[in-house]
């Protein structure tokens, strides 16, 4: 079982402030699952507009946090780290459900399991909880793409708005 601090997380994800949404990895079983946390503070930049009178973490950012945890799990499983030669793309989200608001002061627990790997597509089941209460759940799909240096990184391997993949969870 692997535990990771922020320095190790930064080696596995290209995300940086304000878009890095994983603070610590509590458990990681290569090829199986990851449990990580995101400490939610009032200093998050999205709280100034979502919502000033009742700050709530956007549900899509909970899904992004799950995708980032999935990226860490996948890179660990492959024995790789994030580099400029590849990107881990978010290619799908299914059955997303939001059950409980996440607010400043919450510690968001991210749980992701690999459901299957078919060709280059990885499918995961993810859920977020706070104090044991379910906040969000979704099925996620991601793929690793090598970046072709000749195209300036703008459209790796044909992915992008017309290629069906978005870099929301590039890891």
Image (spheres, helix red, strand yellow):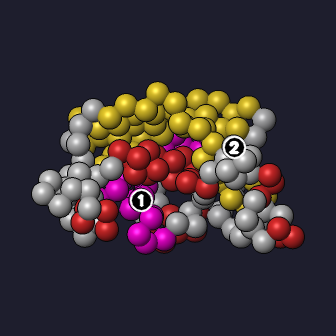
- Which tag, 1 or 2, sits closer to the chain's start? 1
- Residue at position x 51%, y 53% in the image: 68
Residue 8: give x, y in percent of width and height.
52, 67
Q: Which residue is nearer to you in this view: 63 or 124?
A: 63
* In the depicted structure, whether residue 93 falls above or below residue 35: above
Left or right placement of residue 157 versus residue 164 in this view: right
Labels 1 & 2 near each other (Cβ < 8 A): no
- Residue 138 visible to an observer of this rendering: yes
Q: Secondary structure at mark 1?
A: loop
Question: Badge 1: few (under 14), some or many (20 or more) residues near its Cα, within 10 Å?
Answer: many
Q: Residue furthest front?
A: 162
Residue 114 spot, x, y in % from top left:
57, 35
Would residue 57 be found to the left or right of residue 88 on screen?
Answer: left
Is residue 55 highlighted in magenta? no
* Residue 21: image tag: 1
Q: Is residue 73 left or right of residue 18?
A: right
Q: What residue appears at the point 65 percent right and 64 percent down from the top-left corner? A: 82
Q: Secondary structure at mark 2?
A: loop
Q: For the point 42% across and 58% down, which residue is it?
A: 22
Residue numbers of the magenta segment:
16-39
Q: Is residue 18 magenta?
A: yes
Q: Nearer the viewer, residue 58 or 10?
A: 58
Between the C-alphas of marks 1 and 2, the distance is: 24 Å
| Drawn side of residue 98 relative to residue 142, left or right | left
Q: Splitting the image into 4 quarters, where does residue 11 fall? A: bottom right
* Quarter of image, res 171: bottom right
Say which of marks 1 and 2 sits in front. 2
In the picture as drawn, the residue positioned furthest to the right comes out as: 150
Q: Where does label 2 land, which residue?
A: 164
């Amino acid at each position: 079982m692997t535990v990771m601090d922020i320095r190790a997380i930064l080696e596995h994800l290209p995300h940086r402030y304000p878009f890095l949404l994983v603070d610590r990895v509590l458990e990681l079983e290569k090829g199986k699952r990851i449990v990580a946390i995101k400490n939610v503070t009032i200093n998050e930049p999205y709280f100034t507009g979502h919502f000033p009178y009742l700050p709530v973490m956007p549900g899509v950012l909970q899904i992004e946090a799950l995708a980032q945890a999935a990226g860490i799990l996948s890179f660990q499983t492959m024995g790789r780290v994030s580099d400029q030669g590849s990107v881990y793309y978010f290619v799908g989200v299914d059955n997303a459900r939001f059950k409980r608001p996440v607010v400043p002061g919450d510690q968001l627990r991210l749980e992701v399991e690999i459901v299957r790997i078919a060709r280059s597509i990885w499918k995961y089941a993810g859920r977020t909880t706070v104090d044991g209460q379910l906040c969000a759940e979704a099925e996620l799909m991601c793929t690793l793409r090598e970046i072709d240096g000749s195209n300036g990184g703008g459209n790796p391997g044909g992915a992008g708005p017309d290629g069906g993949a978005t870099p929301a969870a590039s890891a």
